[in-house]
Amino acid sequence: MNNTNDSRLQLFEFQSNKVRVVLIENEPWFVAKDVCLILELSNNREAVSKLRDKDKGVSSIDTPSGNQQMTIISEFGLYELVLSSRKPEAKQFKYWLCDEVIPQIRKTGGYSKPKTALELAKEQVKLLEQIELQNQVIAEQEQDLIRQSEVIDELFNYSSIIRVAKFNKVCETKFEWRKLKAASRLMELEIKRVPCPRYVTKLLYHHDAWRYVYPETQLPETTTLIIKPKEG
């Protein structure tokens, strides 16, 4: 590729290393010297010489010492050099180019600088507010499910471990579901399964099974609970 005036120089930064990119006919061409430095390819000429002729060229680059003719490589040539590097950061460099720099160059013709700390902080606050609002909605939905679940928690002489523990003001671990299950089978009593927000489903055991396993435990009344709808 020969030198051309149809070019725009873009300056990017990867882990404190400068990467100069020349836009030629809206396609990115990278200064070979910058790329080889990041990839720790000590012999720039040797590395570039292995590329196809159409993937390398020369362009006039503005430097502190004035305009200089510098070797540039195409996007495809860039990937060829990345593959030839044994440096662990080479993969990160490729991801940075593929995920950020090149897509943005093609979309906007340039690369925007990273956001400032203040901008990031504002976005973080906004995100946290959205998360808090979502958590409030989820919490309200869970409370609704709990209310609906409690309606059938003690119907027809059946109670769950959750309900009995709450009624007796003790820890749920005091009651063993295996013993209640065994007693229910022995007495040929049905074990009911109902939805529960905490455990997806919960088991309700007949009060006869409860009295058989835990005779001294107080059982809730077997009338249907009346859950008042939320106001508003």
Image (cartoon, rainbow, N blue to C red):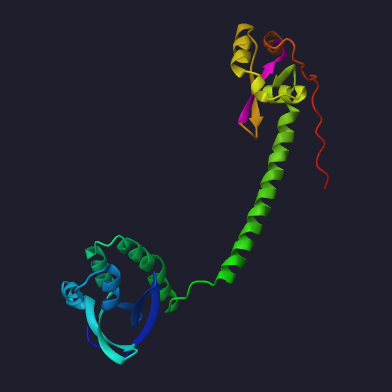
Q: Residue furthest bottom?
A: 66
Give yes or no for residue 60 being in the magenta stretch.
no
Q: Is residue 56 visible?
A: yes
| 50 to 215, vertically: above or below | below
Left or right of 59, for residue 107: right
Left or right of 206, for residue 38: left
User: Measured from the top left, where is residue 186 in percent x and y?
Assistant: 61, 6
Q: Quadrant of residue 106?
A: bottom left
Nearer to the camera, 81 or 138? 81
Q: Is residue 4 visible?
A: no
Q: Quadrant of residue 90?
A: bottom left
| Residue at 52% across, 71% down | 115
User: Measured from the top left, where is residue 16 in percent x and y?
Assistant: 39, 72
User: Measured from the top left, where is residue 161 in percent x and y?
Assistant: 68, 22
Left or right of 122, for residue 61: left
For the image shown, how many numbered marks are present on the structure? 0
Give yes or no for residue 206 being in the magenta stretch.
yes
| Residue at 62% across, 67% down | 122
Q: Quadrant of residue 35?
A: bottom left
- The residues colored magenta run 200-208
User: Measured from the top left, where is residue 60 in percent x and y?
Assistant: 29, 89
| 196 to 59, vertically: above or below | above
| Residue at 79% across, 24% down | 224
